[in-house]
């Protein structure tokens, strides 16, 4: 995806390739995500429990419908996750 952005507004000028991928999240306490993500879209409100790249457990509490949250994760945990319809986003531009 390419887009033009305005430097005067604090963005980069010119075409920017986000070089990103997205995929539906399958919650699991044991299986890793297909790739590390650096954002998650929440389609149904609730909590999101996850492991960061170092394997440390974390939790986003009270996530709202339709919001994309920045986080680095290798696994979205079944235990402790009540949010639904989640989409993982892996973008080199966000790293």
Image: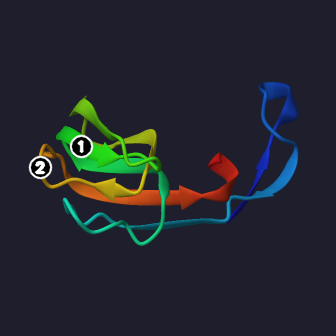
In contact (CB < 8 Å): disc 1 and disc 2:
yes
Q: Residue 10 falls in which quadrant of the image?
A: top right
The correct choice, above or below, for 79 with respect to 70 in the image is: below
The correct choice, above or below, for 67 with respect to 1 in the image is: above
Helix, strand or loop at label 1? It is strand
The x and y percentages for residue 30 are 22, 65
Q: Which residue is mark 2?
A: 79
- Front position in the image: 3 or 83: 83
Left or right? Give the position of 89 relative to 85: right
Left or right? Give the position of 89 relative to 28: right
Left or right? Give the position of 75 relative to 79: right
Helix, strand or loop at label 2? It is loop
- Front position in the image: 79 or 63: 79
Colouring convention used in this rendered image of the protein: rainbow
At x 78% / y 35%, what residue is drawn? Answer: 11
Q: Which residue is mark 1?
A: 49
The x and y percentages for residue 72 are 47, 46
- Label 1, label 2: how many angstroms apart (C-alpha)? 7 Å
Q: Residues within 10 Å of mark 1 (few under 14, many from 20)?
A: many
Quadrant in which the N terminus is drawn:
bottom right
Disc tally is 2
Say which label, 1 or 2, has the lower sequence index: 1
The correct choice, above or below, for 35 with respect to 59 in the image is: below
Q: Residue 68 falls in which quadrant of the image?
A: top left
């Amino acid at each position: 995806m390419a887009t033009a952005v305005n430097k005067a507004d604090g963005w980069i000028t010119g075409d920017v390739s986000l070089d990103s991928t997205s995929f539906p999240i399958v919650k699991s306490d044991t299986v890793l995500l297909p790739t590390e993500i650096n954002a998650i879209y929440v389609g149904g409100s609730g909590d999101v429990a996850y492991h960061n790249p170092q394997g440390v457990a974390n939790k986003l509490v009270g996530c709202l419908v339709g919001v994309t949250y920045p986080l680095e994760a290798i696994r979205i945990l079944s235990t402790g996750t009540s949010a639904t319809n989640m989409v993982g986003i892996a973008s080199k531009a966000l790293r």
